[in-house]
Image: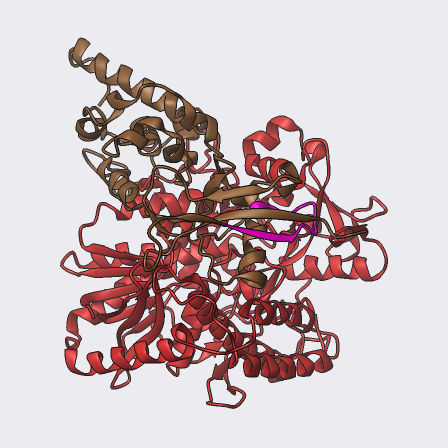
Amino acid sequence: MPEKRITIKATRYDPEKDEKPHLQSYEIPFYDESMVVLDALNYIKSDVDGSLSYRWSCRMGICGSCGMMVNGTPKLTCNAFLRDYWPQAIVVEPLNNFPIIRDLVIDMEDFMHKLKSIKPWIIRKQEIPLGAGEHRQTNEQIDDFRQFSQCINCMLCYAACPVYGLNDEFLGPAAIALARRYNLDSRDQGLKQRLPVIGDSEGVWECSFVGECSVVCPKGVDPAKAIQQTKLDTTMRFVLPYGNRE
Amino acid sequence: MDFESYDVLVVGGGLAGIRAAIAAVEANPRVKVGMVSKVYPMRSHTVSAEGGAAAALRPEDSYENHAFDTIKGSDYLADQDVVEAFVREAPVEVIQMEHWGCPWSRDPDGKISARPFGGMTTWRTCFAADKTGFHMLHAVFQTSLKYPQITRHDEAFVTKLLVEDSRCVGVVALDMRSGRFDAITAKSVILATGGLGRIYAFTTNGNICTGDGMALAYRAGVGLKDMEMVQFHPTGLPFTGILITEAVRGEGGYLLNNQGERFLKRYVPNKMELGPRDIISRAMMTEFEEGRGFEGPHGKYLHLDVRHLGEEMIDRKLPFMRELGREFVGIDIVTDPIPVRPVQHYMMGGVDADISGATPMAGLYAAGECANVGLNGANRLGSNSLSECLVFGAAAGRAAAEYASSAKPVTANPVDALLWDEARRVEVEFLEKKGGDERIGAIREEMQREMDTGAGVFRTKEAMEKLIEQLGGLRERFGRIRIDDTSRTFNTEVTAAMELDFMLELAQTMAVSALAREESRGAHARRDFPERDDKKYLKHTLAFRREGARPRLEYRDVRITNFQPQARTY
């Protein structure tokens, strides 16, 4: 039986010589039903064209580095199976809404700044000393923020977000979800410090509730919900005098 | 060419590296810390750790029990003073992580919970469901963002340590994005680059685990300790090698052969599924050899069965395992057994470092998987490594900050020359290389295959001698590599070539160290020398680089304090 083959069209862009990105087509063997898009890229790099650049590491959906547009949808390429596309060709492009550094590698410095801006760490009015042991926290209290703590910073939600596409000042889904993760943590008292950033006009209010972020999230995080809850929180702070939590 | 200068420079942005950076700043808030990593820190392989972090926190536990379990697990190759210090610090560090926001799973009273783990005699593995490494890494990384003293150099690949008068004074790094070579100098340097699993074909490790820090130190003349000691985890998914956590067995999962039999009763009858990794991996290989494995499209496998635990328990304690089964194997672990087989997972060996992370080179420290501080000996117990990253990352950070406070500043003069020489070397050997005909992918795959065969779960003199010879041939072919990518912008072919260069070097130290240890101890199982030999080999192996020749080996006595070696049975 002739070997099964599949065509991968990958974005190529080298700022040193290309004016703009273009697609390059590679036909490669599809030799195992377990192959994913990342395996195809690795085959190309190893055996066909060593100059194709992309990021990847864990290949188990947790490090968050291999997000790309696969046939127009933001995906982790480590669990986008070739068998779901074959015999059609697969178009692999860098994530939408980000500047391209090279080939399939996006520039995510903007997110790194936004992440820091929401103060993603436990803020306490008074730290308890290590000798006093742990904060008591029940599994039910963890449930309050659990889903928002699952964010792997893969950037698929930013690639899917039409608002971020138009206005990169928008804080964006993952950063707001992570702010929510800390605001809902029973150990944290930093809501007031985060509100100026997330309650700003470029914070939650920019979101027009398209909800695509939650659809593409590979980890079941619901940033759209985080944004709606935060809107409610910020409103309640104006309505309720002093009654709300810190 | 830029010239950044720090008091302390951390190479690597995983759990050990970030913990070290924070510890340095907390030891002395005036310390300027640099952190250079070839990936964004949250991509570091800590993220893939699943099961938990060991700490004797519960009232029924004791330091002594944790120490003894660790030492017995190490097959008595651990340095006992190091283990004793480790077990005292681990609970403090787990609490510190709690204060930094790690969502540890809790007991009903709200205290940090624990689960059983292999080789541990009591419940002491603290966990955040089955994504412990992920949660710890993100918690510590996000916490690090609040320290203005820490400056990151993300996506910069370190090619060489800067050494001046036998003292480490920084690194040369290739900035991936700009293609620029930078000298990043510092009064002290901490290596925290993780493991080297990508030397093997079948590994749980991510693409970035290429042993960079070990190779950098080795090339600078520092010894590599116990490089023959490689851990094979019993339960990896066939084809991908994706890790299925030991917590699956900790929570009550069974390992079954093709007879439906819990075969571990013949190997570790008192521990069964909670035996240590080295022994269980050997048991599984023996089941394969004796025809009791399943045959699949990706080789032999056994069953890891959690069906009897029920959906509620699986969703609460092992949700990521269910997700991995669903997404990567197409099974539901609630109703289907998981196919597994032994897989390279962890490197016990590493850069020779002491209890504070100091290496024999002035100004150079190492922590985490890339270091060998003497904690794990010949076999690491599951869940000791996340704790190791915390305890020894923090120790190295404090020691490096202390060293920096009294060290002489680094002078520009020799650094400029060293930077120029190193940039030229990388350009000649890689970036401007013309003409070669060997694909780096082909050499890498052959190295990985040879290592799987020659330096796997069971070893023999013949196979290792053949391996050393093959590695020599691959080294020769590496001199004729072809580089397709001529761009200076995010050139991942050149970094992959440099990683392969590192790995070929490390593979040789592993094979040579393994060949010389004519006994079986922990993960180092010789078919031709099946017994442990304490008279000859209650010693650490140290491998030193020699130009154009096999590494020179030295031996150093293991430090014994309270636990005399005895037969290791479970």
Whether residue A121 is visible: no
Estimate the x, y position of residue B434 in percent, counting from the top left.
45, 77
Q: How many marks?
A: 0
The residue sitting at the top extreme is A239
The quarter of the rendered structure image containing the N terminus of chain B is bottom left
Instruction: Give the percent coordinates (x, y) of residue B541.
Output: 53, 80
Image position of B143 with respect to B353: above or below: above
- Give whichever of B341, B199 is nearer the camera: B199
Tell me which corner region of the image, top left, top right, bottom left or bottom right, holds residue B314: top right
Q: Nearer the viewer, residue B21 or A37?
A: A37
Indicate the position of residue B52 as horizontal and vertical percent values. 50, 46
Q: Please, is residue A49 above or below residue B374 in the view? A: above
The quarter of the displayed image where residue B289 is located: bottom right
Q: Is residue B531 left or right of residue B61?
A: right
Residue B538 belongs to the span the image colors magenta: no
Question: What colour denotes chain B?
Answer: red
Instruction: Give the colour in which the image draws chain A.
Output: brown
- State the residue in front, B416 or B67: B416
Q: Work out whether residue B80 or residue B260 is closer to the camera in this orientation and state it.
A: B260
Magenta range: A24-37
Say if residue B290 shows up in the picture. Answer: yes
In the depicted structure, whether residue A105 falls above or below residue B451:
above
Rendered location of residue A241, percent (x, y): 15, 11
